Image (cartoon, grey):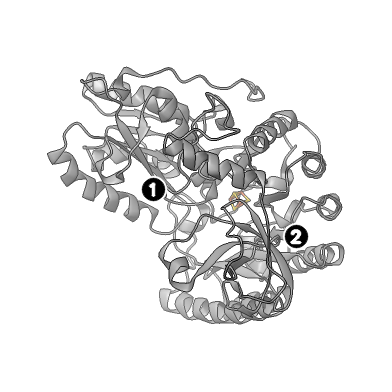
Amino acid sequence: MSLASADPTVIDPSPAALRADGSPRSYTVRTLGCQMNVHDSERLSGSLEAAGYIAAEDADQADVIVINTCAVRENAANKLYGNLGQLASVKRVRTDMQIAVGGCLAQKDQGVIVEKAPWVDVVFGTHNMGSLPALLERARHNQEAQVEILESLEVFPSTLPTKRDSASSGWVSISVGCNNTCTFCIVPALRGKEKDRRPGDVLAEVQALVDDGAIEITLLGQNVNTYGVEFGDRQAFSKLLRAMGEIEGLERVRFTSPHPAAFTTDVIEAMAETPNVMPSLHMPLQSGSDSILRSMKRSYRSKKFLGILDEVRELIPNAAITTDIIVGFPGETDEDFEDTMRVVEQSRFASAFTFQYSIRPGTPAATMDNQVPKKVVQERYERLMALQERLSHEENEAQIGQQVNVLVSVSEGRKDSATHRLSGRAEDNRLVHFAVPEGAEVPRPGDVVTVQVTSAGSFFVVADEVPGVYSVRRTRAGDAYDRRQAESCGVPTPGATPGAVNLGLPTIRTR
Ligand code: SF4
């Protein structure tokens, strides 16, 4: 079956979305895991709303609780069963409530979930997210748990209705699945081989988001730079980046995650030559030791990795590069770990997600017999964290005195009000906390401010007032934010499209 179609998947209204008195049932989605999962949760919300459910104002009182699980992160199973344990007592009181479990862990554990937690109503996998409303309906009708897991995709998930979290920024999947076989990773087993969307479908989705007010798009894939492998175009990803540059009104383009093995010069050139592709790059290192990379089945070596960073920095001197690193992979010796420290020192990452290796059942590395003792892993991890914190701090300090353009995010709540600062992301994706000078225009989320960096921490930079620097550029994304706010209060706003899809409140953070 071809997955190339851009035809939207139609979700029919479900009688199960209505209570006996005809009022709509409410839902909430709890997301465990990575950005892919957060975006999948937007699709689950969109599918439920298409079926007639409404987002719960109070997540604890929702009629349907969906848990979108992750099998990649540590303790995923503990987190899931912890969540389900809490919900068991809630369900004893509110017997009408339904619980659905989806995502990677559901794909992996399948029927085991209802064996361990028989109060769960629906289990669905990564390949059939759009079936959720139908499965909830069947479970309610039959008074019996429904477990439905498909072994391969039936429709590309991007065709599902999507309820977007943010007015200014959107995620767009370009591919799902992965053809690599990294030995620590469960993704190939759970998400299957790489499936690529047609460039025209990707661009149409981006255009629709931009028409709706978005000014920033992040292209998503397990391995974005192999995009095109399915339809036989090795340069498809760089072409896609250049095509993104043609979309009027699109100010910021990002992507995640690339893989060093197939990261080619045409992609770096496209990044450098396409003005709206941002100078930031997440490039997963995983280990600086060549023998560990070999045993991880990562087909690049540290020299090649460092060469990519050199090439990126030569063409994009202001690029902020971030990474992922696993400490304590089976067989990692002291020398291997020192290699990682050396490569990290040389790479000067702006920040790094560092993980302690832990066994993920179902992955090849789980059965390797030379597992590193926990104490050793912990010590190495702490040393690596200390090194990276120093480097991040130094990299951020180098920004002091620079003027940066910050895309303002939705307020970070109490912290922002305590410091009297607002927050957002610079073009290189650095987190910036900035002050609004007294009497100056306060930006809306989605607007862009220009500020000067005045101090730095390891995880952010601060831009306090520097006379004559602060300015606000009102954007379409700020207008879109205003429209959402007004729609959520039922107040019509000038410029609002009549009958536009209600994209919901960006302030609801239950996902
Ligand atoms: S490239 Fe490796 S780590 Fe990334 S999704 Fe594929 S198998 Fe997993």
Secondary structure beneath disc 1? loop
Residue that protrudes farthest toward the left in the picture: 93
First in sequence: mark 2 vs mark 1: 2
Can residue 411 be seen here? The reply is: yes
Q: Which residue is mark 1?
A: 510
Tell me if mark 1 has few (under 14), some (14-19) or many (20+) residues whose alpha carbon lies within 10 angstroms of its own. Answer: some
User: At label 1, which amino acid type do we have?
Assistant: Thr
Question: Quadrant of residue 442 in the image?
Answer: bottom right
Q: CA distance from mark 2 to mark 1?
A: 31 Å
Q: Nearer the viewer, residue 50 or 168?
A: 168
Query: What residue did someone put label 2 on?
Result: 279
Q: Is residue 26 above or below residue 468?
A: above
Which amino acid lies under the numbered mark 2 shown in the image of this protein? Pro
- Please report the residue visible at 66 percent of the width from the left and 43 percent of the height from the top: 476
- The front one of 159 and 493 is 493
Quadrant in which residue 158 is drawn: top right
Say if 342 sits above or below 64 in the image.
Answer: below
**In-image side of 31 versus 475 (left or right):** left
10 Å neighbourhood of mark 2: few (<14), some, or many (≥20)?
A: many
What is the number of the mark on residue 495? none
Residue 221 visible within the image: no
Whether ligand 1 has any atom under 8 Å from the Cβ at mark 2 is answered as no
